[in-house]
Amino acid sequence: MKQLSIALLSVLFSITSAHTQTKDIAEIKHLMQQSATDWNNANLDGFMALYDTAATFMFSTGPVGLEKMRANYERGFFKDGKPIQQLRFEDLEVRMLGTDHALLTGKFVLWGNNLPDRKGIYSLVFVKRNGSWKILHDHSS
């Protein structure tokens, strides 16, 4: 009887864990789509809100913090407060790294405005703080 109880608890834990992972994966993908919407609506503050306050972005010279990351977006991708091109994400794959961390890989596409598409790949490390998923590290190229 004790072995049956342990087996049932293990199954219930596995089901609960799988449900939580599925929910977290869906939430991370939704947050990415929302960030693209914010970008496309010239809401750089909204786009940047997905980043954790301790986030880093990998430049060719090494990682930088939020201030330099934002300056890079403003200088290279926005003009007069509006995005030069629209943004979309493709091929999003989330791999859970425990309960409070996840790795997201995918492709970004900047398109429109009679300019050639600019495409690249990225890997993002997410952290769950106070119940919310945030980007902790961004490596895009």
Image (cartoon, rainbow, N blue to C red):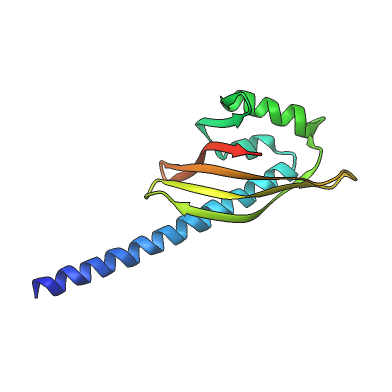
Image side of residue 88 versus residue 111, left or right: left
Q: Nearer the viewer, residue 98 or 22?
A: 98
- At 71% from the left and 42% from the top, the residue drawn is 39
Horizontally, is 78 left or right of 125 in the view? right
Image quadrant assignment for residue 12: bottom left
The residue furthest front is 60
Tell me: residue 81, above or below residue 129: above
Q: Is 101 rendered above or below residue 93? A: above
Coordinates of residue 57 in the picture (x, y in percent) = 58, 32
Q: Residue at x 53, y 51 (%)?
A: 28
Residue 43 vs residue 9, the one in the foreground: 9
Quadrant holding the C terminus: top right
Q: Is residue 92 above or below residue 9?
A: above
Q: On the rendered image, what quadrant is the N terminus found in?
A: bottom left
Tell me what residue is drawn at x 40 percent, y 64 percent: 19
Q: Residue furthest right?
A: 114
Comparing 17 with 123, the one in front is 123
**Count of numbered labels shown in the rendering:** 0
Image vertical order of residue 94 relative to residue 116, above or below: below
Question: Could you tell me residue 91's position as x and y percent?
Answer: 63, 57
Q: Is residue 98 left or right of residue 118?
A: left
The residue at 55%/55% (across/down) is 93
In the figure, is residue 53 to the left or right of 72?
left
Q: Position of residue 43 (x, y in %)?
A: 70, 38
Q: Position of residue 129 (x, y in %)?
A: 42, 40
